[in-house]
Amino acid sequence: MSDIAVVLPDGSELGVPEGATLEDVAYEIGPGLGDDTVAGKIEGELVDKATPVSDGDRIEIVTDQSDEYLSVLRHSAAHVFAQALLRLYDDAKLTIGPWTEEGFYYDITGVDLDEGDLREIEDEMQEIVDADYDIERVVYDREDAVAKYEDDNEYKLDILGREADEAEVSFYEQAEFEDLCQGPHVESTGEIGAFRLLNISSSYWRGDEENDTLTRVHGTAFEKESDLEEFLTMREEAKERDHRKLGQELDLFSIPTVTGPGLPLYHPNGKTILKELEEYGESMNEEYGYDYVETPHLFRTELWKQSGHYDNYVDDMFLLDVNDEEYGLKPMNCPGHATIFEQNSWSYRDLPVRYAENGKVYRKEQRGELSGLSRVWAFTIDDGHLFVRPEQIESEVNDIMAMINDVLETFDLDYEVALATRPEKSVGGDEIWEKAESQLESVLENANMEYELEAGDGAFYGPKIDFAFTDALGRKWDGPTVQLDFNMPERFDLSYTGEDNEDHRPVMIHRALYGSFERFFMVLIEHYDGKFPLWLAPEQVRILPISDDELGYAHRLKNDLEDAEFRVDIEDRSWTLGRKIREAQDDRVPYMLVVGSDEAEAGTVSVRDRKEREQQDVELDSFIDHLSDERAEKREEPDFLD
RNA sequence: GCCGGAGUAGCUCAGCCUGGCAGAGCGAAUCCUUCGUAAGGAUUAGGCCGAGGGUUCAAUUCCCUCCUCCGGCUCCA
């Protein structure tokens, strides 16, 4: 007597009685599965196994073998933390404690914790885990739940007033501890194999700075100790690779206090890498028919009023008063480029017109956001603006996507694509927006690209396709972008003469391959751990003479390498060879050439790479030939000694 | 911008709680050593103790304000 049906992950339907829970469904599939059920998913959302299913729901059963099990376990770890906290601190008050991608956090208040306290709480948590308390879901009437919190926890009451607004609400209980919670949770505290409290920071109730400040304790948990160890090692690795640390060690850039916040200085090593990135972008722009233009950093605010930036962006702009007139540092390059376009009259035959500029822009980000090169006040966009006829949109966007694909492949970065649509604050009419959004959508469809929809994430002047890539540590970053813009051409009254001898409005496409050089550089530093591919390495070869007797030979080698346009230095300090190698290794120089009396006599070099491999009696010519190929092909690792 | 933590030599950090001559390691300079695949030795220099104000006989140390950085929140390329 099945009266409803649910859809299983394989697409098949299963009939179950009305009112059946996920656990019932699992038992229906098989008793073994029923016994193993920890939680479930309804329409992709992780919920408790006691949740009733509705007709037509797409459901999934979560067991301790599922990927989602870890989230459930971490959610329970958050409860164990809360229980330990309440045991140790009478005044502690709980708010919310969800799982996250990396672990869990619990926002609390009424206590003042420092790192040392975390170790104590961990000890108490361990006792709770060792005691292996059963975790039970208990359903209360709403009034009873309200009564529990009425006296002392306005946050839980707020939750009861908003999200948990049904007649019955669920609590999870373990020993003396109970917490209003939707779940799901594991069955007993003993299932939490390994956990660690990571840091203390702060947050606001419901993420709103108008609300109370809460203390947020981050932690993580795993089934096995070894998984925790691996996680902590990765965290250490990320810390070791921090671009702010490497930037200093490798002498790439600095952001001294005296120059102001978020205003980085690039040292010769850093600029060398940026220059290679610029040249690579330029070669690509050349290939795809872009013309370089250049615009100043400062414009009358008249321009920003015309473009709409003044209305939409003025809070983030640096404004200055010059002879009683208001000027603004440019937050974007597009108005300048649109103005250049405006200076000529154009035929339909001239389009597409493609302008490129590595343009420095200035955005007054919130002070607390600034961080190394990842968030700065001054950054450079490898900007491109295309002025195209409407029927050229698709092929131009396709070309740009091909360029972006090339760039990301060069750095061995996988990526995902998202379509970002009209934001709340925007310029232009509904019709224009709908047209732009559907055009981008059809370009993606026609190119057979998989993409996600990011509603409301577009630029204020048009929708965009964003490319999010993943670095070597598995972290996701925003980078390249293509934006379709029917608005800026209106605002600047841009036109071209068509075949029909009438004026027509061009469409503007904004695009960036790297996004910002600063952010992309930062990601590369961490992605490569400072071990840049040969083509990017600030110092590509270091010559290590064994004694001063070989200095003359070393200089001849250096000249030959420099003739082939390599960046070469000689280590001429009076150090032992071991010391010279150590320093070169620390500086992550791809290749070291060790030269002693043997090499000087034979006219050869001894090659060592930063992967700690070596080979003697190498002819310089064959080394240079190899390096030239390695550089030209932008290969990732030194491979002469492969 | 908001909450919390921190700013001492070029770098990493000790000293601060309990006020009384500013410390170490690394790096740098000089000298010795001329070395065969991840740290040779000695000597010397180097400081507005983030900035300003206050308390005190005396402030790197205690108090206040500001600046900058770090971890988060919110925002974003």
Image (cartoon, coloured by chain):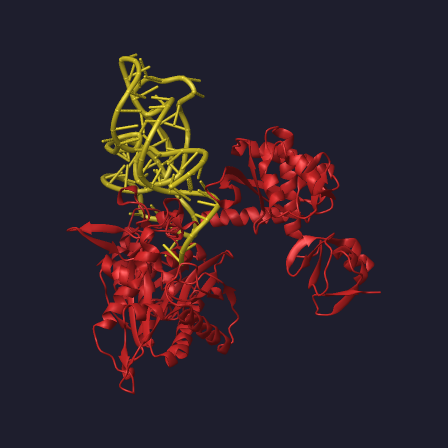
**B26 or A210, which is in the foreground?**
A210
Chain coloured yellow: B
**A221 or B77, which is in the foreground?**
B77
For residue A434, what is the image quadrant?
bottom left
State whether residue A33 is above or below residue A498. Answer: above
State whether residue B46 is above or below residue A450. Answer: above
Residue at left 33%, top 52%?
Answer: A316
Is residue A252 visible in the rendered image? The answer is no
Residue A211 appears left or right of A378: right
Q: Which residue is situated farthest in the bottom direction here? A: A500
**B22 or A641, which is in the foreground?**
B22
x and y, in percent, of residue B62 in the image: 38, 22
Residue A380 appears left or right of A416: left
x and y, in percent, of residue A88 in the image: 62, 29
x and y, in percent, of residue A500 in the image: 29, 87
State whether residue A138 is above or below residue A375. Answer: above
Count the marks: 0
Residue A325 appears left or right of A31: left
x and y, in percent, of residue A262 in the image: 33, 48
Q: Which residue is situated farthest in the right direction here? A: A1
**A324 or A334, which is in the foreground?**
A324
Locate the N terminus of chain A and report the quarter of the image it occupies.
Answer: bottom right
Is residue A171 visible in the rendered image? The answer is yes
Chain coloured red: A
